[in-house]
Amino acid sequence: MPASDVVVIGGGQAGLAAAYYLRRAGLSYVVLDAQPIPGGAWPHGWNSLRLFSIARHSSLPGWPMPAFSDGYPTAQHVVDYLAAYEKRYDVPVRRPVVVTSVSRDGDELKVRTDSGDWSARHVISATGTWWRPFRPLMELPGRQLHTVDYRDPGEFAGQKVVVVGGGNSGAQIAADLLPHVSPTWMTRRPPRYLPDEIDGKALFDIASRRAGGVGELGDIVAVPPVRQARDSGLLTATPMDADVLARADVVIWASGFRPALGHLSPLRLRDERGRIAVEGTTAIGEPRMHLLGYGGWTGAASATLIGVGPTAKATVARIDAELAARPR
């Protein structure tokens, strides 16, 4: 069974940020990624998906994202950057490798995969949330999709489409549909737009310095397509309506995600609410287990490209100090 100081689960932006600092610390590590290609969740977004900020404010540690000539970078530009980042830092990624479980094994943690087992002194879980979409349980006659299923508006031409969700995904998908259909956009409360000048860099700054984070200001970043649709009066939200949902040909649930943490079940770390208590990114119930990039509860803005770096740095520093105090 191969052994490393650290096994990183997930080869997206959080896993690569961790790899950068593990390399600098001189620790032995491997990144196990379930996806067949680089880029984490970015290859799976809808076709028009773009970042909230320009390239220089969307970078992982060590190497700025190359400039993008046409405003906010596309998802493919992010994929290309992450693939090049892997090569630049010679990240030892094994893919596709699906991690099925992490369990205690004496002084080590055992990482079981569909390609054999690994032994690690510490494990960083960086699997994100995209792979665990939250889908409301509703019986509806029409087709039901989630954000993860949406790709292109053209397939919905001539259909009655309802988009449900008052966050960024709901607003962006509703705006994306407008040239092809007249979607109904449903939200549980009136949409709250952040100031138009807010972008990804500002989001990171706000999340880092304010106790209430970005949520104090609003829920939706007014990226150009959303802003144009809103200002033209075409993007307006309506309250939830069961009758409208029942008459829809398609309902697209922009209803969010949950952390993809099923592989950690053998460690029995979840509380009655299904959350894992952490100190920083370290699981309180298992100090050899670290959770990186799942949102504010694992580091301010840690689910973003620009925000995951500081949390990854702190995580690796803690691992390095612990390993130095506990030599083999």
Image (tube, helix red, strand yellow):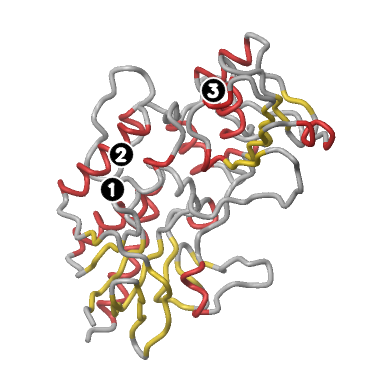
User: In the visual, does 317 lie left or right of 230?
Assistant: left
Mark 1 burial class by Cα count in 10 Å: few <14, some 14-19, many 20+: many
Quick one: label 3 or label 2, which is nearer the N terminus?
2
Answer whether labels 2 and 1 touch (C-beta < 8 Å): yes
Question: Position of 263 compared to 309: left or right?
Answer: right
From the viewer's perspective, tell me whether residue 219 is left or right of residue 83.
Answer: right
Q: CA distance from mark 2 to mark 1?
A: 7 Å
Q: Name the foreground residue: 41 vs 29.
A: 41
Kind of residue at badge 1: Pro
Res. 17 visible in picture = yes
Circle 3 is placed at which residue position? 176
Q: Is residue 205 above or below residue 181?
A: below
Pinpoint residue 326: horizontal percent, then vertical percent: 28, 83
Q: Residue at x 47, y 31 (%)?
A: 202
Q: Residues within 10 Å of mark 2 (few under 14, many from 20)?
A: many
**Amino acid type indicated by mark 3:** Asp
What residue would you read off at disc 1? Answer: 38
Mark 3 vs 1, N-terminal side: 1
Q: Classify residue 64 by image quadrant.
A: top left
Q: Quadrant of the N terminus?
A: bottom left
Please, what secondary structure does the residue beneath circle 1 have? loop
Q: Amino acid at mark 2?
A: Val
* Mark 3 and mark 1: Cα distance apart in space: 26 Å
